[in-house]
Amino acid sequence: MIEYDYKNDEIANIINNMIIYAASKRASDIHFDPCEKGLKVRLRIDGVLQDHTIVPLAYQKNLTTRIKLISGMNITESRLPQDGAIKDVINGIDLDMRVSSLNTNLGEKIVIRILDYSKSAEGLNSLGLTEKNLEKLKKMIEVPNGIILVTGATGTGKSTTVYTMLQHLNKEDTNIITVEDPIEMNIEGINQVQVNSEIGLTFGRVLRSILRQDPNIILIGEIRDSETAQIAVRASITGHLVFSTIHTNNSLSTIERLLDMDVERYLLSSALTGIISQKLARRLCPHCRKLRPTTPYEKIVFKEILGKDVNEINDVNGHCDNCRNGYYGRIAIHEVLMLNDEIRNAINDKDLPREKLKELVYTKDVTTMLQDGLEKVLEGITTFEEIYKNVAIDNELDNKYSEDAMTSSSNFKLESITNGSSFTNSTLSYQEEDGSKPVIKKQPTPTITPIQKPITSTPKIASIKPEIKPQKDTLELI
């Protein structure tokens, strides 16, 4: 915790010092949380919140008013949520900051998001893509028309990926127009339009207008509704290359979401060029990481997902002067799908089952997010714990083993494995019989055998005490 001199220093200087400190520590967000004692200030560093300082109750109002003032908010309105922005140069780096206020029962909560898009100028190689995925990405952006979607949850680096691709395509002979809400980064040579729904300047209205501005490339900040999705797809089939983002988890769910948004199947099948799905995992500190033996569960995962026998992987080793708790920065894990004719035909077939579409999407040509993450674990870039936290490993294993589980008579189960590791999986255990290949088998759903003898009177229901087996410790991610 850091203490500031509120009695002798100006509030403006204190706020500036907080922002400078947060930027120097690579924080992505600064949280000002109201509490009974004042404001608790927390920083999100590498995706994890940590306490920074406490602002005394006597200075809470002055600090929130100052932040709202410099971010262009209405300082007299404290009941309704507001959004603002701050632009500044800190330590020679241009930083754009988005500010959001929300009224709570203890006062106004303010969050400052620090946007550092300096990586977008470093080129496509800085995105953390594998060689195979990078090659597919380069092929997709060379297509003269079509729509390329970058998907993921909030704060997973979608904007950084989109801006990096735009920077790569930003040339003298190309007219690029963006429609954003808000404009997160000013790029020289690109025409950027800010949406303003209060005056009727919506995504749909701007898109209809910019199609008459002779664009080569269009960026739509986010596909939020059916109207935006339909206009974006139609723009891509009229000779434009369209980029956009959408909040979905993977390639298959992205296709399903667009169809749910009433995008015509024949348009989507011909317009969609590719999908880039991504999540962020904490990067393992290269200075203090250590090798450790893999647990039996981890061996199963590497063998079944990557087809590799792995006996050792890198893990955290406390922390050093270069990192925080063994991590430094974050790395993106990707799933890149470039559509082929087979997938296009499948999208156009409304009677095709979801499982069949899934089989066509996830062929050997597609590296899933789990596969990409496990490859980065083997390279010592991140840890198995981070991949387990971000990707549903157990679901993929269940899908992979489901057929064997139904036909096998083995009693193999997965329960808790620790093997001296800090990582614990409470739902899995290891048991192998007769040296045969282990099979994951779900516990059968208990059934009730009906009474065969006819009931001639009101039956007396005996109290039944179910046998309750003690459960293992719950999953602990350290």
Image: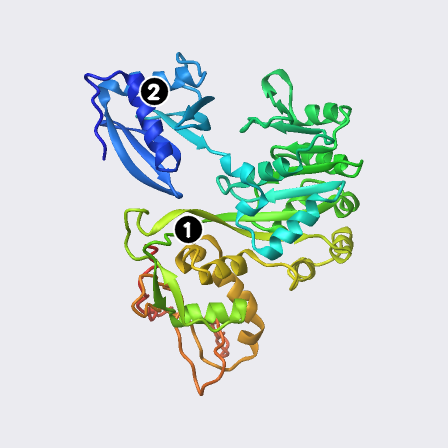
Q: Position of residue 297 (x, y in %)?
A: 41, 69
Ranked by sequence position, the earlier of labels 1 and 2 is 2
Q: Quadrant of residue 215?
A: top right
Quick check: 237 left or right of 466? right
Q: Secondary structure at mark 1?
A: strand
The amino acid on which the numbered mark 1 sits, given as a three-letter code, is Arg
Frontmost of labels 1 and 2 is: 1
The residue lying at 31 percent from left, 40 percent from top is: 50
Q: Position of residue 32 (x, y in %)?
A: 33, 28
Residue receiving disc 1: 283
Q: Position of residue 433 (x, y in %)?
A: 43, 84
Farthest residue toward the bottom? 434
Residue receiving disc 2: 64
Say whether residue 269 is visible. Answer: yes
The residue lying at 33 percent from left, 52 percent from top is: 326
The quarter of the rendered structure image containing the C terminus is: bottom left
Q: CA distance from mark 1 to mark 2?
A: 34 Å
Question: Nearest the camera: 300 or 101?
Answer: 300
Say whether residue 459 is visible. Answer: no
Count the labels in the image.
Answer: 2
The quarter of the rendered structure image containing the N terminus is: top left
Question: Nearest the camera: 451 or 144?
Answer: 144
Question: Nearest the camera: 382 or 236?
Answer: 382
Q: Quadrant of residue 224?
A: top right
Q: Against 398, is 276 above or below?
A: above
The amino acid on which the numbered mark 2 sits, given as a three-letter code, is Thr
**Is disc 2 surrounded by few (<14), some (14 to 19) or many (20+) residues within 10 Å?**
many
Q: Quadrant of residue 73?
A: top left
Q: Against 239, is 138 above or below?
A: below
**Is disc 1 surrounded by few (<14), some (14 to 19) or many (20+) residues within 10 Å?**
many
